[in-house]
Image (spheres, helix red, strand yellow):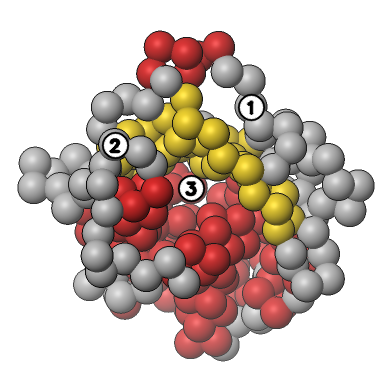
């Protein structure tokens, strides 16, 4: 079975993955190999994004914890009403923002996975190829959520995060055709909405955020300008 999957993946990766169908097929086949060869979820980001492609909402502790904890720490320290954590390192914010738009850890772990099986890594090595894949993947997970269903959740400030496609970017040279939008649902049901707009070259990004009271969130339009 392994040889068949690798053969299919090799053929699939000979072309740019730029459709939702193509992205879904890629991650579904990768997950088959992960289930056998990475049972302890060492490649946590690769596991999470593969699962998310196949399920609208993820809530497993093992799958989502490492992704949600940095977001929870950011909210706990930045949003009024939750106080602060003396051990929080603000230098990690930029890394977190880049993760939310460029999916850097996912990219690194996917490349390591492909190299492990002798598969082409063009999808990770080439910026245009990666951004085409991310744009296709965004269509799969749109309006999907990540949370932790355990009663012993380690999260202090948030319930879940929801990925959305925001409005049309302001910048004409934006990498994606939409604003990358993450709606962070707080434990008091307010939403901290973060929008990111990515640009080519140095991969600079602009960021916008707004705190939405719970009763008003349904009437608030998507972010247009990050």
Q: Is residue 136 above or below residue 45?
A: above
Callout 3 secondary element: helix
Q: Which numbered disc covers residue 121?
A: none
Q: Earlier in the sequence, mark 3 or mark 2?
A: 3
Q: Is residue 78 above or below residue 81?
A: below
Q: Nearer the viewer, residue 8 or 195?
A: 195
Q: Nearer the viewer, residue 129 or 186?
A: 186
113 to the left or right of 205 = left
Q: CA distance from mark 1 to mark 2?
A: 24 Å
Callout 1 secondary element: loop
Total residue callouts: 3
Q: Which numbered disc covers residue 81?
A: 2
Outermost residue on the right side: it is 172
Name the residue at 65% across, 55% down: 134
Q: CA distance from mark 3 to mark 2?
A: 34 Å
Q: According to the image, label 3 marks what residue?
A: 53
Q: Which numbered disc covers residue 222?
A: 1
Picture coordinates of residue 148 (x, y %)? 23, 44
**Residue 15 shows up from this direction:** no
Q: Do the residues bearing badges 3 and 2 touch, measured as CB atoms within 8 Å?
A: no
**Residue 179 shows up from this direction:** yes
Q: CA distance from mark 3 to mark 1?
A: 23 Å
Disc 3 residue crowd, few under 14, some 14–19, many 20+, Cα 10 Å: many
149 to the left or right of 113 = left
Name the residue at 37% across, 33% down: 185
Q: Is residue 38 above or below residue 216?
A: below
């Amino acid at each position: 079975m392994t040889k068949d999957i690798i053969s299919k993946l090799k053929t699939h990766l000979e072309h740019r993955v730029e459709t939702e169908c193509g992205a879904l097929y890629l991650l579904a086949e990768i997950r088959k190999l992960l289930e056998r060869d990475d049972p302890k979820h060492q490649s946590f980001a690769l596991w999470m994004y593969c699962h998310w492609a196949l399920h609208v909402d993820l809530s497993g502790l093992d799958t989502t914890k490492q992704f949600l904890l940095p977001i929870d720490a950011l909210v706990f320290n930045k949003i009024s009403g939750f106080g602060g954590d003396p051990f929080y390192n603000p230098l990690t914010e930029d890394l977190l923002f880049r993760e939310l738009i460029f999916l850097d850890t996912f990219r690194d772990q996917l490349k390591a996975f492909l190299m492990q099986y002798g598969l082409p890594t063009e999808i990770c090595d080439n910026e245009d190829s990666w951004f085409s894949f991310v744009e296709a993947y965004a269509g799969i997970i749109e309006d999907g959520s990540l949370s932790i269903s355990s009663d012993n959740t380690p999260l202090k400030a948030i319930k879940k995060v929801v990925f959305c496609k925001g409005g049309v970017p302001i910048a004409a040279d934006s990498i994606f055709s939409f604003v990358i939008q993450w709606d962070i649902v707080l434990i008091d049901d307010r939403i901290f909405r973060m929008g990111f707009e990515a640009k080519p070259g140095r991969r600079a990004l602009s960021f916008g955020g707004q705190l939405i009271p719970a009763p008003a969130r349904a009437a608030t339009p998507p972010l247009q300008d990050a």
